[in-house]
Image (tube, rainbow, N blue to C red):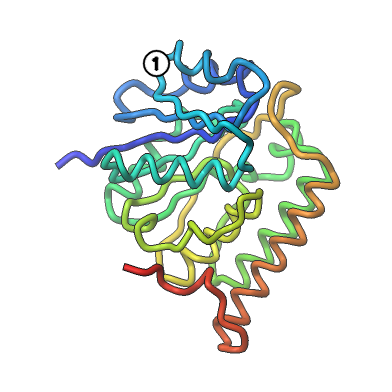
Amino acid sequence: MKLKVVVVMPAYNAAQTLARTVRDIPPGSTDERILVDDASRDDTAAVAEGLGLTVIRHPENRGYGGNQKTCYREALRRGADIVVMLHPDYQYDGRLIPFLTGFIEKDVCDVMFGSRVRTRREALAGGMPLYKYVFNRLLTVLENVVYGQNLGETHSGFRAYSRRVLETLPWERNSDDFVFDQQLIAQAVHFGFRLGDVPVPTRYEKSSSSISFRRSAVYGLETLWTVARYLLHRWKIWPSPLFTARSS
C-alpha cells in the first residue's frame, strides 16, 4: 500500500522564494502540500494559494515552533503516513524529497534529515555564514556525542517524520521558538526512533530567511539547555515533561 506523503511548510514572509521552492518538488512525490502562514507581512498566503497549496493562516505570529505545531496537527488530521517539513525560503532542495521519504517507506529510518554540511568547502561556498557554520559544527558534534548519533547536521530545516513518530513524541510541549527542532531531535532519541540523513546542497541567498547573530546565540544556548535537560532526565535527576510520554 502506498504511503500518504504530506509536505508542510512553516512560512513567514516567504513570498519571494515560495514559487521556486514548490517548483523543485518532484511531481508525484507528495500527495498534499500545506503551508502555514505565520501572520506574514507580505503576500505569502496569496502566492501559496496561487500555487495550489492548502493554506492555513495564523491571525498572529506564533513563532517558528508554534507554526510547526499547526503544520503537524493538520498533516496528521489529513491522514499523512509521512510528513516532510520543508522551509519555503529556498534554502533546501525539494528535489530530494523522495530520498528522505524512501528511507522511511523502506522502514530503514523513522526520521530523516537533509544535511547541508557534507564538506566545509561546500557549506561555505553555498553561502552559509562562517559563524553559523562554526555554531552548527560545534552543536552537531555535541548532540551526536550525547545522543549517540552520527548525523551530518542536527540543524536542518528539511526533515521527514513517520506518522508513528509524530503520534508518539510530546512535541506539543515544545517551545514555540526555534529550539523546537532541537527538542524534537532529543525526544526522538529518547523514545528510541531511528534517525538518518542525506546530503543536500547549501543555499543561502539574500532572499532566504535567516536569523540574526543575537538570535543565533540565544538559539545555541537553548540547544545546550535541551541537551542538559535530556541528560538530567535520563539520569533521573530532574524529570522533564519533554521526555514524558504524552497522555493517551
Whole-percent x, y for residue 131 in the image? 83, 46
Give the residue type at disc 1.
Answer: Gly
Looking at the image, the residue that sits furthest to the left is: 1
Q: Observer-nearest residue: 49 or 57?
A: 57
140 to 11, vertically: above or below: below
**Residue at coordinates 41% horizontally, 34% vertically from top-left?**
7
**Residue at coordinates 52% horizontally, 58% vertically from top-left?**
184
Mark 1: few/some/many CA within 10 Å (<14, 14-19, 20+): few
Whole-percent x, y for residue 186 in the image? 55, 65
Q: Observer-nearest residue: 137 or 221?
A: 221
**Residue at coordinates 57% horizontally, 31% vertically from top-left?**
59
Indicate the secondary structure of the residue bearing disc 1.
Answer: loop
Q: Which residue is mark 1?
A: 52
**Residue at coordinates 56% horizontally, 57% vertically from top-left?**
151
Q: Observer-nearest residue: 19 or 130?
A: 19
Q: Quadrant of the C terminus?
A: bottom left
